[in-house]
Amino acid sequence: MFSRSRTWATALALGLLAVVFTTSYLGAFLDPSANTKDLPIALVNQDKGDLGHRLSVGITGENGDGAVRWTTTDSAEEARELLKDGTVYAAVEIPADFSARVQALNAAASANDGTGTATRPVLTVLTQPAVGPMAVGAAQGAATTAASGASRQLGASLLRPDATPVQKLLLQDPVRAEVREFRALPAQSAKGLAAFYVPLVLVVVSLMGATAVGAAVGRSPLTAASGARAGSPLRTKAALMLATSALITAGTLITAVAVLDLPAPHVTHLALLAFGISAAVGLLMLALTELLGLLAIPFGMIGFIVLGIPTSGGPYPMEMVPGTFRVLSHGLPLHHWVAGVRSLLYYDASGAAGATAAWTAVAGCLALAGVLISAARWRSRTGHAVDSAPTAL
């Protein structure tokens, strides 16, 4: 009877886990367009004339629904600094001679000899491919749509009721947007998603490693027969997990960098962070297992994988997922580890771009592991210990 009840309980738990997975992944990614809010884009107005100002106002007013968060500046260098570390995903640049070019175009359209020699002024839309293909696509689409709408508004304000056909042709949409990459990624970068896949591999394999270490040491005849103190098996597990983390780090980075040619300009720092991520995940899982036994496995999966992937900022930027996931991303480590690896791969190891937050997340996981280990030892001393070795159901 007990075995049958346990089987049904296990089946029910797996069904609930499927519900949680589906809700998390599909709930986060089903409708990114509707979820988009505060997409960071810079607007650079280098033109001192009235027409540049009117176009700038028109561009920022095109996204009144809050889908875009515009950062306005008159300095191209400032905009490039924002692009450099991914603070903004794209930048729209209005050139310094914009007003003069529009006036020349209008004059040419009004001339009796046709279109003259004037050409449509060009806005440059710079994109940052390191933020990932979905973020780049959304930012580029929002920027070009806003520029096109503002161009038509400006053209309508320039057209007089008695405009000639040539004037209508040239001034109905007087501005052209040209899209360029701010800094192209190397070919072997998975379009910026390598920064997501590397920490994801480390987390998944480290979760499996912690489960294997817990089972192996928990069942060891030597540990059971040695008469060691209660803390000795846990120290053995921790030491074995650290050694396992070193192997996981080596296997991941040797394969990624040496075999698959992933460009890694800060490979030493990347290796240290990778080891820190693996060790943090492994030790935290061991601590959870000591405290909760088999319940640690679903808790670890939910925290690191089920909620971790939608809040990571990897497949989709946080500006394109529902608000609940944006809030959760601040407290879940995978989000910070993706940002940290992205900083090391693409942003010259900038601490502000994510490297500092990644190490903070490692430290936070290790601190939480220490708290849980203390709680497990207290349980052990008071006679309430649980079997921490995962067993077959």
Image (cartoon, rainbow, N blue to C red):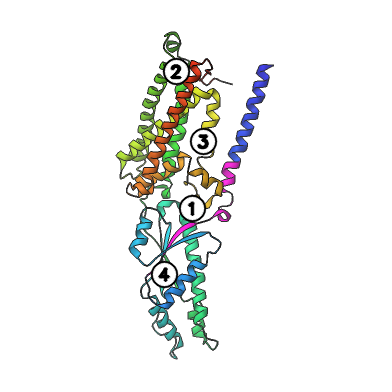
Secondary element type, mark 2: helix
Looking at marks 2 and 4 on the same chain, the residue that comes earlier in the sequence is marked by 4
Query: What kind of residue is marked 3?
Result: Gly
Residue placed under numbered mark 3 in the picture: 303
Residue placed under numbered mark 2 in the picture: 217
Separation of marks 2 and 3 at Cα, in angstroms: 24 Å
As for residue 42 lying within the magenta part, the answer is yes
Q: What's the mark number on residue 134?
A: 1
Is 1 situated left or right of 278 in this image?
right
The spot of residue 254 in percent (x, y) is: 34, 36
Vertical order, 123 against 234 (above or below): below
Looking at marks 1 and 4 on the same chain, the residue that comes earlier in the sequence is marked by 4
Q: Considering depth in this image, is 40 or 120 the residue closer to the camera? A: 40
Query: What kind of residue is marked 1?
Result: Met
How crowded pointer 3 is (Cα within 10 Å; few <14, some 14-19, many 20+) is rated as some
Q: Considering depth in this image, is 167 or 69 the residue closer to the camera? A: 69
Separation of marks 3 and 1 at Cα, in angstroms: 24 Å
Looking at marks 2 and 1 on the same chain, the residue that comes earlier in the sequence is marked by 1
